Amino acid sequence: MNNLINSVGILGIGSSLPDKVLTNEDLEKMVDTSDEWITQRTGISQRRILEEDEPGYTLGVKAAVSALEDAGITAEDVDLIIVTTETPDYMSPSTSCIIQREIGASKAAAFDLNAACTGFMYGMTVAQQFIKTGYYKYALVVGVEALSKATDWEDRNTCILFGDGAGAAVIGAVEDGYGILSTYLGADGSMGHNITIPGLHSDPVEDAKRIHGKKHTIWMDGGAVLKFAVKIMESATNEALDRCGLSIEDINLVVPHQANIRIVEGAAKRLGVSRDKVMISLDKLGNISSASIPVALNQAIKEGKLSKGDNVVLVGFGGGLTWGSTVIKWAK
Ligand code: UT7
């Protein structure tokens, strides 16, 4: 019989970004757009992207190694690796197995989880269950995305939005009363057609949307997603707060999915959160899907925005459509 664990939280965190910077000025030379349009409509001024011959998993490996260092454990201590990604380098082997191999986590079980941009919320919640029951001691959750490889660089509606990157967290037992206070996950598959990246099956409806004939690229109804996102960011935050009996006034920092400044500001306004309590990293990184929340959280920690005992909300939404939120009492 395993011993139940009272409190589960983040023991260490790390991130990794590609070196190559793609600015709005660079995009002006690629599609009919302008720095002014992109900045006003999205808040993004640049993003990091992988070189063509650089696989995405390399970012996940670096993020994982730095999260392990931060947690003060080794790869051999890891029991479970969950990789969240919607842009894997291979259909098989999974990115989690590749990362397991690369870091030498020989005793770890490993699987990938796809909840699009909400992936990290899903991954953390799954990991939490394994730790809470005592089944595993340490789980590594890695959000790693190579969106540049799924981008149609001729489609100005989408190519200005995305970047590449990885963020990782070691999940384990923390001091009682700290760590994850609540989580909330949701999905509405009936809205899934609003953001698609086709895989192996060729669907004529999806093919027709891709006017440049690139069948496996991202297509999105930006307006529909924007409307959905503002509402769900508010309601998902409130649901996670209700589940742990806190109110928004108890929150020191909100780390939202970094999709668009208008979504983040719209949700913050509805929630009544001041701008200084909302972490923003999208200006320099664009939308990096499931890596966006752990990368932004790591940046917040490096900037000294979180201290032990602070309450932080992580909240995201994305393809599926999916959404998720968690409230954490910071334990480090
Ligand atoms: O994590 C995944 C979730 N995805 C998102 O969070 C995306 C959510 N949606 C958005 O961020 C916004 O909808 C966009 C930034 C994608 C678009 O902003 P918008 O205010 O919804 O613009 P729009 O799609 O309504 O387009 C307005 C105009 C259109 O021209 P017309 O039809 O009015 O003549 C577009 O063709 O802007 C045009 N347009 C552009 N113009 C210059 C679209 N993309 C561009 C561009 N540069 N890159």
Image (cartoon, rainbow, N blue to C red):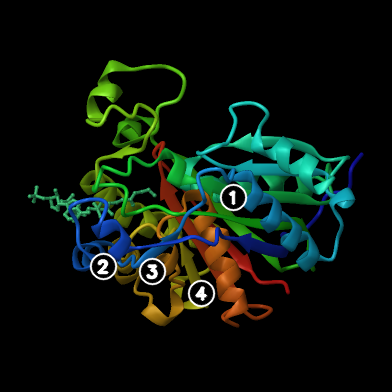
Q: CA distance from mark 3 to mark 2?
A: 8 Å
Evaluate whether residue 124 shows in this view: no
Q: Are marks 2 and 1 in contact (CB under 8 Å)?
A: no
Judging by the rendered image, the residue that carries numbered circle 1 is 143
Q: Which residue is mark 4?
A: 253
Marks 3 and 1 in Cβ contact (< 8 Å):
no
Q: Nearer the viewer, mark 4 or mark 1?
A: 1
Q: Report how far apart the C-alphas of labels 4 and 3 lie in the structure.
A: 18 Å
- SS label for mark 1: strand
Mark closest to the chain's N terminus, 4 or 1? 1
Vertical comparison of 304 with 193: above or below: below
Picture quarter with the N terminus: top right
Q: Earlier in the sequence, mark 3 or mark 1?
A: 1
Which quarter of the rendering shows the C terminus? bottom right
Viewer-side residue, 312 vs 51: 51
Of all residues shown, which one is farthest toward the right? 1
Residue identified by numbered label 3: 283
